[in-house]
Amino acid sequence: MQLLDGKLISSQIKAEIKTEVDYWTSKGGKKPHLAAILVGNDGASETYVASKIRSCEEIGFTSTLLRFDSDVTEAELLGAVEQLNNDPDVDGFIVQLPLPKHITENTIMEAVHPAKDVDGFHPINVGRMCKGLPAYLSATPFGIIEMLKRADIETAGKHCVVIGRSQIVGLPMSILMQRNTYPGNCTVTICHSKTQNLKEICKSADILIVALGRPEFVTAEYVKEGAVVIDVGISRVPDASKKSGFAIKGDVNFQNVAPKASFITPVPGGVGLMTICGLLTNTLMAARKEIYK
Ligand code: NAP
């Protein structure tokens, strides 16, 4: 078994981006600028946003955080999105999900200008991705694709099973894995809560990508000998032995599955760090106006 080390790969990608930013700014260019909107005080969201901002600092991006209380109205939030859309200094921005129930996430995502949609959630970016046109790819699937590429994992002709069909992970992941390129050219099966014979389907996967949000759901019985296992899940599970009172768990039972896998991502230290790299890469592309002029 080989560990797909998100810490190592993400630190290499960040160093590469930093080199580019240093070169660019040394020639008088503006630092790429990523902004984030954070609503409420959800512990996990706070952690994700803090880590995105810390990464910006590490690689020489400017970052801005706009915070709102959880009772912010949809109109107020749309106003903030509009402000960032029109701010010429901001290259790209994200609205950290999930949003409070009284706000329709799709309405907010569709209000973000596609040229600044560095999370890759806007229907125009999703549509362009589906058509194989240049687009900001959804940050988590983008990070996974980059991880497969850097680990030189063979994908052509393989059976890839994706558990989960969410707009931000499972669905774009399945589309990227079937594209006629590398990594891609897989035969893809997408599974969800109504899938029958989930275990059997997973057991036929050469590449198993797990994004359902249920801690340690996937055990060795779901995994074929030699499969590549990518664990997207991040859940906080109560753990009195930890200072924080919780442990971070993936959707895969690592101890149980690792001996069967050819490659496997740990949690933490796997896909989460690659997601940030996807976001930073999209922001660099936005600053260079690579996709939208
Ligand atoms: P989500 O929107 O809740 O979607 C979960 C998907 O899993 C749904 O499609 C659901 O099916 C399916 N599902 C749920 N229970 C299932 C079951 N028993 N069998 C088969 N399918 C089942 O979740 P998400 O946003 O994609 O996130 C998934 C996990 O990834 C979470 O732990 C989240 O925290 C984590 N995540 C991590 C990163 C990262 O950077 N590492 C980024 C994003 C998310 P239905 O569609 O039928 O309901």
Image: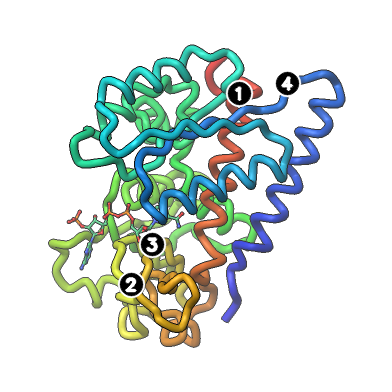
User: Is the distance from the Cβ of mark 4 to the nearest ligand 1 atom less than 8 Å?
Assistant: no
Looking at the image, is mark 1 or mark 4 nearer the viewer? 4
Q: Are marks 2 and 4 in contact (CB under 8 Å)?
A: no
Name the kind of residue labelled 4 in the image.
Lys
Sequence order check: which comes first, mark 3 or mark 2? 3
How crowded pointer 1 is (Cα within 10 Å; few <14, some 14-19, many 20+) is rated as: some
Residue tagged by mark 2?
215
Q: Is residue 285 visible?
A: yes
Most foreground residue, 110 or 160: 110
Q: Quadrant of ligand 1?
A: bottom left
Q: Is residue 120 visible?
A: no
Q: Are marks 2 and 1 in contact (CB under 8 Å)?
A: no
Name the kind of residue labelled 3 in the image.
Cys
| Residue at 71 percent of width and 26 percent of height | 31
How crowded pointer 2 is (Cα within 10 Å; few <14, some 14-19, many 20+) is rated as: some
Q: Which element is circle 2 on?
A: loop
Sequence order check: which comes first, mark 2 or mark 1? 2
Name the kind of residue labelled 1 in the image.
Glu
Please tell me in which quadrant of the rendered image residue 9 appears.
bottom right
Residue tagged by mark 1?
290
Q: Are marks 3 and 2 in contact (CB under 8 Å)?
A: no
User: Is the distance from the Cβ of mark 2 to the nearest ligand 1 atom less than 8 Å?
Assistant: yes
The number of numbered discs placed on residues in the rendered structure image is 4
| Residue at 83 percent of width and 18 percent of height | 28
The answer for how far apart the CA atoms under marks 3 and 2 are is 21 Å
Of all residues, the one furthest to the right in this rendering is 26
Residue tagged by mark 4?
30
